[in-house]
């Protein structure tokens, strides 16, 4: 059970290790691209290329939607970024329950956005947890965990990919012993739990009264999608890459300033604490460009003030 590109490797390595994958469960096809054509999730595309039956129920909370899973009689469910909470009847379909690869060190960052939350909150270390699923939100007991440092230039995209690259062999190490009943579980400390949330569009908007370090984390947390943004001349301007610098001169938050030689970029934006060096920008309807190219192509950008 999984959906996005980073978890295709989980399915691929299960097959390479000789496990029998009875079926794949993934999210329904969704519109994508400029034409908004229905597009299959990456896990579905891989499964179909390898002749694995695919199920895409909108919900597993109705008896008729869970029956095909019951009919499979699996030993275990392997869940990786599936995108749905599994009800009791779905978890009970497998003789040994469901094992989830969760990209955080539980009980920290339970919920749907653990990697983005890790970056937003400035965590120095994260990791992967293999847990036995229960009906709660990432609250089940733990089989094994592994730590991983957060790199200063990590985005949600790069960190997610790395965590599932770590989590896949971790899962494979425990899968057979778990099915044979040879492993013990460790209960989570529920009193130490923190919870993530689904982000709304307003969470992606850059507020330049905030410190530059916080804004740089916001840029990295919302890459590769949906992107942190501001506006320029009535159009959405996404900041694809940026880095924080100490303030070199006093300027109103949101003011576009020229940065001294040796800076990560020739232009930056003043913030509530420091300057956010702008490296790559993407104006609505245009191609992504370096901030230097953007400034040269848009007279009046340097010296203007972006909204907060």
Image (spheres, helix red, strand yellow):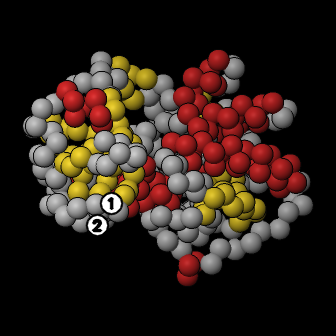
Quarter residue 270 falls in: bottom left
Q: Residue at position x 78%, y 31% from top?
A: 15
Q: For the residue carrying disc 1, how many other residues have a C-alpha within 10 Å: few (<14), some (14-19), or many (20+)?
A: many
Quarter residue 3 falls in: top right
Image height check: is 304 above or below 11? below
Q: For the residue carrying disc 2, how many other residues have a C-alpha within 10 Å: few (<14), some (14-19), or many (20+)?
A: some
Towards the viewer: 133 or 209: 209
Residue position marked by numbered label 2 in the rendering = 273
Q: Where's residue 49, x and y in %?
A: 65, 17
Q: Where's residue 2, x and y in %?
A: 58, 40
Q: Name the image quarter holding the C terminus.
A: bottom left
64 sits left or right of 285 in the view: right
Instruction: Inspect this view and state whether residue 124 appears.
Output: yes
199 sits left or right of 234 in the view: right
Q: Where's residue 215, x and y in %?
A: 33, 57
Q: Residue at position x 28%, y 40% from top?
A: 238
Counting residues from the N terminus, which is met first, the one under dot 2 or under dot 1?
1
Image height check: is 116 above or below 63? below
Residue position marked by numbered label 1 in the rendering = 212
Q: Where's residue 168, x and y in %?
A: 72, 44
Quarter residue 150 falls in: bottom right
């Amino acid at each position: 059970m999984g959906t996005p590109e980073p978890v295709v490797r989980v399915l691929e390595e299960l097959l390479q290790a000789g496990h029998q994958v009875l079926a794949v469960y993934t999210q329904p096809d969704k519109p994508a691209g400029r034409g908004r054509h229905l597009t299959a999730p990456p896990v579905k595309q891989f499964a179909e290329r390898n002749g694995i039956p695919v199920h895409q129920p909108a919900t597993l909370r109705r008896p008729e939607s869970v029956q095909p899973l019951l009919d499979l009689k699996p030993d275990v469910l392997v869940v990786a970024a599936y995108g749905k909470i599994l009800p009791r009847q779905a978890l009970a379909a497998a003789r040994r329950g469901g094992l989830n690869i969760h990209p955080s060190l539980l009980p920290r960052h339970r919920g749907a956005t653990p990697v983005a939350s890790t970056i937003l909150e400035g965590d120095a270390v994260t990791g992967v947890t293999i847990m036995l699923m229960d009906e709660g939100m990432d609250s089940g007991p733990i089989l094994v965990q592994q730590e991983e440092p957060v790199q200063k230039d990590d985005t949600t995209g790069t960190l997610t990919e790395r965590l599932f690259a770590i989590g896949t062999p971790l899962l494979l190490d425990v899968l057979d012993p778990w099915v044979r009943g040879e492993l013990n579980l460790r209960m989570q400390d529920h009193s130490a739990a923190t919870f993530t949330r689904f982000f709304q569009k307003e969470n992606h908007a850059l507020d330049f009264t905030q410190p530059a370090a916080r804004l740089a984390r916001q840029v990295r947390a919302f890459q590769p999608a949906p992107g942190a943004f501001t506006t320029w001349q009535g159009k959405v301007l996404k900041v694809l890459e940026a880095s924080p610098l100490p303030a070199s001169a006093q300027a109103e938050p949101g003011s576009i300033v020229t940065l001294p030689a040796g800076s990560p970029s020739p232009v930056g934006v003043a913030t509530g604490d420091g300057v956010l060096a702008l490296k790559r920008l993407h104006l609505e309807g245009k191609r992504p460009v370096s901030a230097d190219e953007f400034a040269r192509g848009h007279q009046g950008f340097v010296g203007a003030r972006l909204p907060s």
